[in-house]
Structure formats: C-alpha cells, structure tokens
Image (cartoon, grey):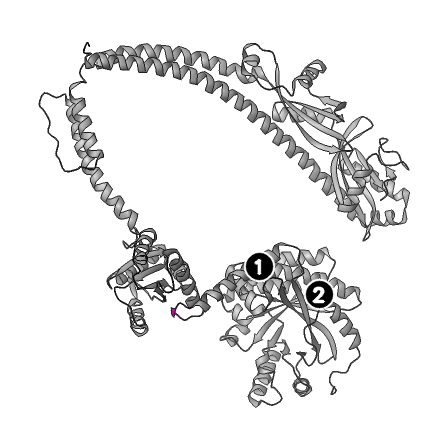
Amino acid sequence: MAVITLNKSIFRLVVGTVLFTTVGVLVSMWATTSSHAQKQLNRNLNVAQNVLTQVLASREQQLYISANALTLDFPFRSAVATRDEATIQSVLQNHGDRIEADLMALISLDGQLISSTNDALEKNTPFAYPDFIKSTVQEGGGTTLMLLDDKLYQVIILTVDAPRPIALALVGFELESELLAQLKNITQLEISLQVRQNALLIFSESTLKPMQAFEVFDQQNQDFSWFDTVLLQKQDYISKSFVISEINEQAVWVVLSENIEHVFSEFNQLQTTISVVAFVSMLITLIFGAMFSRRLSKPLGKLARIAQRISNGDYQKSFNHEQHELAEVQALSSAFSAMQDNIQARESKIIFQANHDILTRVNNRYHIEKLLDDKLQLNENFQAIGINIFGFRGINDIFGYQSGDTCLRILASRVAELGGLTARLTGGELLWVPDSAQSFEHLARLKTQLEQPIDDAGVVINLKIAIGVIECPMQADSAQLLFRRMNIVLDEAQITRQLLLKFDPAIEQRYLRRLSIIVELKKVLATEQQELSLAYQPKLNIGANKIRSVEALIRWNSATLGFVSPEDFITIAEQAGFIDKITEWVIKRAVSDALVIKAAGIELCIAINLSAHDVMNEDLLPFVVQLLDQHNLPRSALSFEITESDVVKDPAKAIKHLSAFREYGFVVAIDDFGTGYSSMAYLKNLPVDTLKVDKSFVLKLNTQVGDQHIVQTVLKLAKSFGMDVVAEGVENQATLTLLQEWGCEYAQGYHICKPIAVSALIDWYHTHIDQNWLESL
C-alpha cells in the first residue's frame, strides 16, 4: 500500500472539508433564509392578529365605558323604569351622538326592542339574537359581533339595574371599510372580514380588490409551500384566518393576507449574493490550504500527546522545545505549558469554590450536605447547631451590605475557630457541627462570646444571635431534614425571643400550623367563601344613653383548621406580609354590612382596627374613600382604631397618614391605650379623636382602686387634649355607673353586648333602642 504523506493528507483534508463546508453552507443558507422569510411572514401575520385583537379589545373597552355610563345614568334608569319612551329615545340619541356610536338601543328582558336609533333594529320587534339576550341577562352583560341589515357591528349589552335588571342597553360601532383601511395602514397587511352561517358565506368586507379577495378566500386554507409559492409563483398572497366571534351559528372570521413578493424579494437577492461570496471564498480557501499544509506535520503528534496527557490530569511534566521548530509551534508549546499550569491552579480553585462559601470561606450548603449525609450513613451521633444573626436584614439596612458582610465573615471565623465543621446555609445563617456535644450552659457562654461587638471602620455593631440545637440522627436522619428542622427551630427562637433553643417536635407542629394558617388564609382570601365573618360589638354613648357605634371584629371558622383565633392568624398574616388583604376584606365587608344596617333604618358608625402596616399603606385611604363614594355612604359610616404600640414604630409617618384620615373626616382612635411604653411622648402630636382604655384596667374597675386611679387619670388626660374616651371591658353595672360619674363618653363590653353578627345586631338594636342603660338591669 502506498504511503500518503502528511502534506497530501492535510491538503486533501482541507480541500474536502472546504468543499463539504461550502456546499453545506450554501444548502443551509438557502434553507435558513427561506425558513427565516417564512417565519417573518408568520410573525407579520401574528403581529397583525395581535394588533387587530388589541384594536377590537380597545373598542370593546370604549363600548363598555360608554354603555356603563349609560346604564348608571339615574335619569335614564328612571325613564326605563317608567317606560318614558320619549326620554329613552332622547337619551339614546344624545348619548349615541356624544360617543359617535352607530347603534343605540334599549331591549326588554324578554328580547323585545323598546327603542333604537338605527333602522337596523326596528322598535317593537324581537331582537335577532335571542340566545345572546338570555346569556346577557344571566351574566349582567356581554359583547359580541352581530350582522344586522347587511352591516357588521361590534356591540356591548349591559343590564339596566334599578337595582334589579329591568332592561338591556345596547351600544355598537360598525366595522366599516374605513376601519379596515386604518388597520391596513397600521399592520401593512390586507384585512378581510367574513361572516359565515353554517360554513356558508353571507357577508364579506375586504381591503383587497374583489377578484383578489376571491382568490385569497379560495386559497386561505392551503398549506404554505416555498417551492410552489416562491419559484412557481402559484400564490400572490399568504393568508391567516381566525374566528373572532360566534353567535347564533354565525362565525365572524378575520383573514389577514401578506403579499409574498414583499417578503421574499429581499431574501432572493440575499441568497444570490451569498452564493457568489461562498464560491469565491471556497477558491481562496483552497489556495491558502495548499500553501499552509507543508510545514505542519512534524510537531502535531507531539502536541497531541501533550494535550492527551493534560486531559488525563497529568500536570507535572515540563515542556521541551526543539530549536528547529517553527516560532509559531514554539509559541504553541509555551501556550500549552501555561495552559497546564493555569488549569491546575484553576481546578484547585474550582474545587475550593465548589465546596466553600466565597464570603466566609467556610463550607457551603451543598458541601456540608454531603459531609452530613456521610456522617449519617455511618450512623454517627453528632450535634448540629444553627447560628443565625438576629436582625441581619436590619444590619444591612442601617449600616449597609458591606458592614453586613463584615459581620457575617467575622462571625463565621469565630465559629470556625471553635473546631468541628462550619458552614454557611443561607444569608445570615451558619451551621456548626462540633467535635463533641455541647451542654446548654456551655452554649450560653459561647453565645455571649460570639456576640462580642464588631468594629467595622470605626462603626461598632452589636451582634445578637439566635442558636438552635438538633441532636442527630435522633432528631434528623438526613441532611435535608436537618436543614428544614434547623430553619424551623431558628424561626421559633426568633419569634419567641428564646435565642437559645433546642428542637422539639412541638415546635415543628406549631410551625406546620402557622404554615397551614398561611396557606388556608390565602386560599380563603382569594375565593368567595363563608369562612370569614365580622362580628360587631356595640359601644354605648353614656351621655346620650344611646348606641351610636360598633366595633368590627373578624372571625375565622376554617373548614380545615376549625376556629382560628384572630390573635393567631392576624399576627401570622402580618409576619407573612399579606395583612393588607385581610384589611381590604374587612373594609369591604364592613361597608356591605353598613348598607344593610342603613337599610334597617339604623345609623351606626363601624370602627375598623388597623395594623401598623395598614397605617403605613398609602393606598389604603384612597381605597376607603372610593368604596364609600361608590356606595353613597358618608365618612361617618366608618372610623378607625390603631394600637399605640403600632404607632410608635414609626411615629412621624404614622402621624402623617393618620392626619390624612382626619382631613377626610374619619374619626381615629388609639386602641389599648395605656399598654404602650411611650404614650405620653406621642399623645400630644397624634391626630386622634378618641382614646380606648385597655380592658385590663376596666374588667375589675369597681373593685380595684389602682385601676380606678389609672382610668381617672386617662379621662383627665384625654379631656385636656380634647379627646373622647372609650372604656372597653365593661362587665357589670357598677363599672358603668363609675364611668358615668367620671364623665367617660363611651362604654363597651359584655355588660352591654357581646360581639354578634350583623343580622343579630339589627334585632338587638331594635330590642334595646329605648333601654335606660344607666339603671340597674
């Protein structure tokens, strides 16, 4: 067998590769450009479909706004209720002229046309789409496309309520040729509308000429063929059709058409140019391939062996250069040598980074998980200690993230110096596995040692840490279970302020219950349900001997969890960050109940409790005002209460927002007054009208002299600031008598009435309307 030289082999390889690559590039180029053209064509059609859909949706929104304004117009509803045909016709005509509607009509609930502004809908005749009328009555409104008198309209129908539906108002715009021309200018595509009755074409409108439109309609369902379309030119347009409305077996189709020549002309020119360039490039590449194939044979085997050795992980041998080697080959050999050193260093660095946290230089979560699983598989007994910086987010917010990183890095080094295994699990959470079990007393001393202040560039940061302890494998037989339970015990330690805490199954049960409460409460708030309810506790106006207001108290009787105390789920909702959803539900329900109370002929102010998050929520006040205005309720229908401990968390912002409530005419009260730690400091600046004395000072007011002094002091203090006082927790007549004697304005408690549902409240109010509360019961 003849021996082929390396030069010939390289030349043949270059020639074969270039030829194969060039042919492949040409074929791929033809396929790619053609595919790209087709994709652009489809993209243009899809964009045009979206534009058309958005335009129709915008017109539908305009129709809704116009129809809604008409149905909410009180004179119009009055005219409809009394069947004042002249007024109805006038309002329809004026409203239609104002919004430039092509179709305005009033339809009875049984489908008879009462009045119309268009000859397409003749008065005192049945409406052409009775099924749509039925669905509209059931759903309160509807929108569709209708063919009336050989014209296509986009219409919306809404019920006219007084307050129940008494008729239907119809507003419509014609889909005329001018609209299609505007859409064509926007999309740069030809647009056609078709109405088919049981697949039979009964109406069409198009921006194409009639003959072109006929061809497009005939070819719209044919599959796209690049060969037939571009080369044989059997089609002038590529079309896409879709249904935008179906009613009474009538389907309204939109056909979007793109001129093929516009899409493929530039691609055909590009394909020709690329073909010429590819051919010239192939010739040049073959020439240079023959030139450079002569001097590449000798060092290739050597470099191949070096590369193989490096790929096998052998980084120890050095490179030897031969003097007669080409300079480029020597440079390549030097590069291989440098690559070997760099790969060795990089591999060591990657292994370290894969197993360690970059900031703290201790083990990361993934590596410690493997180490822990190894210990557990060997059935080793060890103690896992979680260490979390208490208030780590606050350190970042106050001192900056750089200082937070410094604290975490120093704390990790302190833990690592104790020996054993140390790892960083999450943001401010470390895990320490000591070489030997630590006693509770020793951990308490270590906690003090680890909490030594940190000096960061002259700024002294006082650390506070929470420690959780888990015994393995007794309390966790896998790393994942250990991580989960460590997170639970550290959360419990921070919530309960027991900053040194051992794991206990009861802790996990409490955690799971909190989690269940969060899940179930979010589910309840997101759906229509009967689990949440409001109970109302009356407040007695002592001076007037009348019930003038009530306090709204939320109750939750869960189908899954049973009765859940507000003290539990309100606190959890605040911690989980969705207390605003509960407040929104309470306000909506209170407004709804206020309407029921008002309908019963009772004037009561409903007091709603707000959390600190609610007070800081800038969107809450506009929401309340809008809701009251929507239901024609006065500001006096609602008042608001907030505990003083919530106020002092951010007094400046709280004062600003509470002042806004006062300016809008709402009464604001401080709840549980006397239990906070800075009442006097902020009371003089708080924009509040009422103080509510905490029930702990009122429950035994008739027998406890100390409580009497406190309540009398609060009354004097409130009078000096011009505020009213509500005493909650009134349990007997003697307490009520004392409050009257001391000039207390309001009393609340079981002696008057326990919290009851709105229906029971109405009955209770009528029963006790003439009762003299200041006489012994």
Residue 95 seen in the current view: no
**What residue do we see at 51% from left, 67% from top?**
651
User: Where does the image place residue 246, in percent across and percent down from the top left?
Assistant: 73, 33
Q: Residue type at mark 1? A: Glu
Secondary structure state at the residue bearing disc 2? helix
Q: Quadrant of the C terminus?
A: bottom right
Is the residue marked by circle 2 packed among few (<14), some (14-19), or many (20+) residues within 10 Å?
many
Residue lying furthest left: 323
- The question of residue 445 being in magenta is answered with no
Looking at the picture, tell me which residue is in the foreground, 187 or 741. 187
Part of the protein shown in magenta: 496-503
- Mark drawn on residue 131: none
User: Where does the image place residue 24, in percent across and percent down from the top left?
Assistant: 39, 16
Number of numbered discs on residues: 2
Residue 257 seen in the current view: yes
**Which residue is disc 1 drawn over?**
520
Q: Quadrant of the N terminus?
A: top left
**What residue do we see at 60% from left, 75% from top?**
691
Asked if residue 295 lies left or right of residue 405, the reply is left
Q: Residue type at mark 2? A: Ala
Report, in whole angstroms, how far the alpha carbon at label 1 lies from the one at label 2.
31 Å
Is the residue marked by circle 1 packed among few (<14), some (14-19), or many (20+) residues within 10 Å?
some
User: Where does the image place residue 391, in percent across and percent down from the top left?
Assistant: 40, 63
Dominant secondary-structure state across the stretch colored magenta: loop
User: As displayed, is residue 60 above or below residue 331?
Assistant: below
User: Where does the image place residue 528, in percent across and percent down from the top left?
Assistant: 66, 55
- The question of residue 500 being in magenta is answered with yes
User: As displayed, is residue 543 above or below residue 521?
Assistant: below
* Front of the two marks 1 and 2: 1
- Mark drawn on residue 637: 2
